[in-house]
Image (cartoon, rainbow, N blue to C red):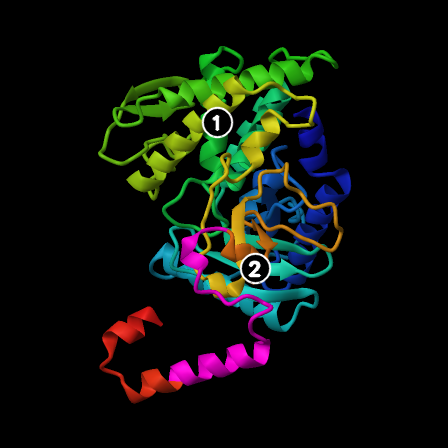
Amino acid sequence: MDALYQRAKLPELGCRLRYFISSQIEDAISGVFPCNRVYLFGSSVNGFGHQNSDVDLILDFDVAHTDKIVSDSSLRFAAKCAAGNERVQTQRSLELLADHLQYLLPGYSNVQRILLARVPIVKFNHEVSGTQCDLSITNMTGLIMSDYLFTLGQIDERLRALVVTIRRWAKAQRLTNPHPGRWITNFTLTIMAVFFMQQRHLLPPLNQLKRDLPRHEPAGNGFDDEMKTLLVEFFEFYSSFDFKRQAISVIEGVAYPKPDFGSLFIENPVETNLNICKNLSADELDRVVVSIRTAVWSLQGSPDSSSDGGPGILKLFTEFGKEHKVSAQRPQDATIVSGYFDGSQRDSSPSRKYMPDQVVVQMSTANDLRKKGPWNNHLPSLKESSPDKASDSVRMRRKSVERNPRNSSFRHKW
């Protein structure tokens, strides 16, 4: 798990590129918003990011949060006050920023305006770094939460490795999705990991958080053992957790009776009256619980490694843990679907690629299919008929169906 965390975490170069993006946008729009500051938040700065994570940005043009204005200067920036609804003003400002990024600023492409969301944002791609960015305005709660998570990661480094592993597992099981919807999010999984470590008295509640708390320094050789123990305990803890009646609070570090009838209630650490899992459906929560229990069974029932190289923890990152035998539905295609890819069937050929849900397909001839069972007796032998004769036979059958459309028995047989 330590190797997985070291390979997945955001390198220093990636972090510097993200700060370069924020400073570039800040300088580009300084003519329209002279008092602006563009802040990074989320996985780019809290220590839980990876190389392919998005860049979350906040634009704040409040004079109180900037140090660009010199107090003894005679020049002052004047602008019109926000008229009407503050949300409408935010949407108009984001529309202006989107036009500026799309038409004037080089190196930015695929600008998308998502202005009707609860937090309006502008999505775009930064071509130099090859990353996707999300820009919002005055959403300072993201900065506060990023500060919380960074401090917790500094207190115990095992939290970051645990979160990276859980996110990788959830992605392999298709529990998370890059697009917003009714499924569980990476932020929810992060808060669940924090609450679990609070219950194990490894992290303090957020209302008792201090930067000068003692840090946990794991031993070099024992880090993987500690992480596997934590991972197993995490899945065991939530496999028996009562999601229907209990809510989670990382501020107090306790579980309390659920205040509403939602499928899952996790208190927002910054805006305590909000539920960060409001969009999670009951069906998706059931999928999460089933996947957690399957992970417990997989970790407890298999060793770390075996003589044939079969992994223990790495089984969590396989989308389907069991083989599924699927019979051939169309014998004339001369293909047999033998089972889902499970790691042991990996092809060493460099030209062959597997998707997460790729199935291993073995090509067989018609003579091989004839030996599989009596349902293949209608297949002609390769020696009995040539491809030309077979195509002529198919053509004659199609003409017969066209001439007799009412012959349902023949049509079903065909």
| SS assignment at label 2 | helix
Residue assigned mark 2: 367
- In the drawing, does residue 220 fall left or right of residue 149? right
**Which residue is located at x 49 percent, y 42 percent?**
140
Distance in Å between CA atoms under marks 2 and 1: 42 Å
Q: Quadrant of residue 109?
A: bottom right
Circle on res. 214:
none
Where is residue 77? Give x, y as percent.
58, 58
Q: Give SS at disc 1.
A: helix
Q: Measured along the vertical axis of the image, is residue 332 above or below residue 235?
A: below
With 277 as the anchor, is 185 left or right in this view? Answer: right
The x and y percentages for residue 153 are 60, 24
Q: Is residue 151 visible?
A: no
Query: Which residue is more in the foreground, 170 or 78?
Result: 170
Q: Is residue 354 above or below residue 78?
A: above
Left or right: where 414 falls relative to 169: left
Residue 185 position within the rendered picture, expressed as x and y whole percent measured from the top left = 45, 40
Say few, some or many: other residues with alpha carbon within 10 Å of mark 2 (under 14 / 14 to 19 / 20 or more). some
Quadrant placement of the C terminus? bottom left
**Residue 134 position within the rendered picture, expressed as x and y whole percent measured from the top left:** 55, 53
Q: Identify the amino acid type marked 2.
A: Asn
Give the answer, above or below, for where 387 lies relative to 242: below
* Nearest to the observer: residue 329 or residue 57: 329
- Tag 1 residue: 295
Q: Is residue 374 magenta?
A: yes
Q: Which residues are magenta?
A: 372-398
- Which residue lies at the image location 55% right of the left edge and 17% below the top edge? 230
